[in-house]
Every structure is written in structure tokens, then in C-alpha cells.
Amino acid sequence: MFIEDIHIFWYVGIGILGLVVGRLIGLVNKNLPERKEIFSTDAIKEYLKSTDANYTIMILTCIIYIALLRVIGMGDKVELLQYLVLTPMLISVFCIDYKLQIIPNRLTLTLLEVGVAFSFWRGISNLNIAIEMWLGMVLGAGAFLILTFIGNIVFRKETMGFGDVKLMGILGLFLGWRRIIAISIISFFIAAIYSIGLIIKNKVKKQETNEFIPFGPFIVISAFIVMLVQLNIWIKLVFFIFSLGKYRF
């Protein structure tokens, strides 16, 4: 049985892999902020014996893995592998940043190392892809670094952490400069909607809106949206936004 020229066996296998990886994400989220060993034999055995498995993360990882296989297919196995490796690390970024308002350097360094490895791997067969990936890193990190400095000057306080800057640079390395533009637009759009909703909620409850909102989760959500939607759609959407609706699909 095939679904879009992909045998159902691959969907089942990818789904099971997603469940296993999702189980290990809980180990990373637990030990990484505490600077403990993560993938040592003892740490894995101790964690697997515990009963605190996060089934939400396991199911979410499984769904994302299957969706990536459906969208990318088996035509470009390197790109599929690249996104499968990126997915659990992004989920960890979301969970840790949302809970602790920090993106651990160990996690961003691992992301960077993996991204550099994939850029060289893909550059062997197509140099243009490698150039696009490295331009994405420069554009992602550079744009958010400028926004961070401007925000600090205008509001006289930290408006965005350097962890977000590093994350955008690394995502640019993974996804290329065109996708990083789409991620930037979508992340600010989602953050704006969330902030407005938070302000309305606090006004109804007559509370002050002074809590710090980590930006990393918005970046991660946007990255998954871009990964799961074809690039040409985002390019058309960017033209539509910047043309103030004059551009037609």
C-alpha cells in the first residue's frame, strides 16, 4: 500500500521513530538545564525506568515526523534526514525556553555543529544549496542582532535575548535565507497575536501586563510551519504582504 508513492511501511517506521525520539526529548529537557550528562548509559537507563514520560511530546514528535515524510518525500533523503534531526532539538528549545526563559548554549552549539555538517554534506552535491544555507545563517543572525540592539536602545531594556539571535542564525543555516525570511515574519505575527491576547486577558482580570515573554517558542513554531509548507507558498505570501495585498497568487 502506497501513500503519495511512499510505502506505508515508511510511515509506520517514521512514526515509531518519532515516538522513541519523543521519549528521549524528555531526557534532554530534564538533564540539559541542570548540566547533567544526557546520553550516558546510566542516565538513559534511569530515565527509561521512570514513569514521567511526556506522551504529549512523544505524540507531537511522531506527528511531525510523519508530516515531514509526507511533505518532503523520499526524493531528497538528505533533506529529510536534516529535518528529522532538527525536529527534536527544536522541541527541546521550545520546552526549555518556555519554562526557564533560556536557550542552553550546549543546545545551540549542538545545533550549530549539526547544521555545519549538513551544509558541507549538501554542498558536496550542490554548492548553491550550501551557499543558500550559509547566507541564511548570516541573514537570520544579522537581522535579529540589529533588531535586538534597536530594541535595547528604544525601550532601554533587553527586548530579545542573544539566544534568539543565535537560534535564528542556526535556523538560517538549516533552512536557507528564503525560509528564514518567512520564519521572521511569521514569528513576529504569532508573537503579536499572543501578546494582544495576553493584554486582553490581563485587562479582564485587572492585572498588570509586565511578565517576560520568551521569543524562542514563537521562532520554533514558525520554523515548523515553514518546514511543513512548500517554499513557493511562503515566497508568494511574502510578496503579498510587502505589496500590501496588491500581489495576487
Image (tube, rainbow, N blue to C red):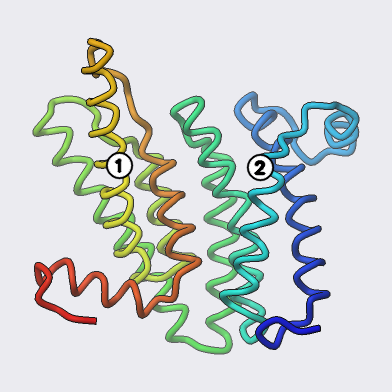
Mark sitting on residue 57: 2
Three-letter residue code for mark 1: Ala
Mark sitting on residue 129: none
Q: Quick one: 182 or 111, which is closer to the camera?
A: 182
Q: Secondary structure at mark 1?
A: helix
Q: Quick one: 38 or 99, which is closer to the camera?
A: 99
Location of the N terminus (image quadrant): bottom right
244 with respect to 32 (left or right): left
Q: Residue furthest front?
A: 204
Q: Residue furthest top?
A: 206
Three-letter residue code for mark 2: Ile
Location of the C terminus (image quadrant): bottom left
Tell me which residue sits at (56%, 80%) in the image.
Answer: 122
Q: Quick one: 188 or 248, which is closer to the camera?
A: 248
Q: Secondary structure at mark 2?
A: helix
Tell me which residue sits at (71%, 28%) in the image.
Answer: 36
Q: Tell me how far mark 1 sits from mark 2, CA to CA.
A: 22 Å
The image position of residue 158, as x and y in percent, is 24, 29
Residue 94 drawn above or below residue 70: above
Mark sitting on residue 191: 1
Residue 149 drawn above or below residue 2: above
The image position of residue 15, as x and y in percent, is 75, 61
**Mark 2: few, some, or many residues within 10 Å (few <14, many ≥20)?**
many
The image position of residue 13, as x and y in percent, is 81, 66
**Which quarter of the picture shows residue 65?**
bottom right
Tell me which residue sits at (9%, 33%) in the image.
Answer: 154
Total of numbered circles in the picture?
2
34 with respect to 160 (left or right): right
**Mark 1: few, some, or many residues within 10 Å (few <14, many ≥20)?**
some
